[in-house]
Amino acid sequence: MGLLTGEALTTLAVALAIFLLLVDLMHRRVRWAARYPPGPVPLPGLGNLLQLDFQDMPHSINQLRRRFGDVFSLQLAWTPVVVLSGLEAVREALVLRGEDTADRPYVPTSGYMGFAPRQVTTAVILALSGQAWREQRCFSLSTLCNLELDKKSLEQWVILEATFLWATFESQARENWCGGRLLHRTLLPGCLFSLVDCLNKAVSNVISH
């Protein structure tokens, strides 16, 4: 038996590729069918990308909603996505089942801030979920509520600090002071100077009160 060459080899390669794609499709559908809501049949490798109009995404989602209901699943390439559409579905998922949907996906920008995927769970504000995230969220909400209730006393400190800030601007302009990085400079009458230090100190003074 001789080696396959030419058209026979090409035909075999194409048939093998199609077979592997079909096996991959069936494997994914069987594995995901029990865990995800119903949705359109994805194509191997592409998923449902060709079934979505990225120029008019709301229309595409609405068409799929009419076909599969308020909760359905999509496959974007290799990434499975669950779509919630409608007030009742969103309310059930985020309010009634909030504990089940509290987790969030890893955001690549967290990596630029020095958090690895496993470290993000202990990054408090950047945490995906967990006890530390819940405690920080409760603390943030209570702090914001206190600021809202005490906003009148806060306003007077903001107004006072704004007065001092404007006086500082005028004095720096008279002295023709210039410093800081170019991105943080601004132009006042006849003078180029940095606002960074002044604004940072003003905000810190308000917070300290």
Image (cartoon, helix red, strand yellow):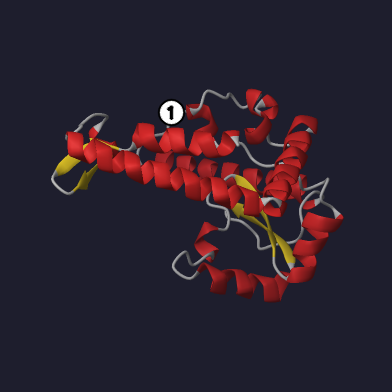
The residue at which mark 1 appears reads as: 2
- Residue at the outermost right position: 96
- Name the residue rendered at 62%, 75% in the picture: 63
- Residue 60 in picture, x, y percent from top left: 56, 70
Q: Along the line of sight, which residue is nearer the eye, 69 or 166? A: 166
Q: Nearer the viewer, residue 38 or 201?
A: 201
Q: Is residue 11 visible?
A: no
- Residue at 16% of width from left, 41% of height from top? 191
Left or right side of 128 for 172: left
Report if residue 36 is visible in the image. yes
Is residue 25 positioned above or below 1 on the image? Answer: below
Residue 88 position, x and y percent, is: 79, 69
The amino acid on which the numbered mark 1 sits, given as a three-letter code, is Gly
In the image, residue 108 above or below residue 35: above
The quadrant the C terminus occupies is: top right
**Could you tell me residue 206's position as x and y percent?**
54, 39
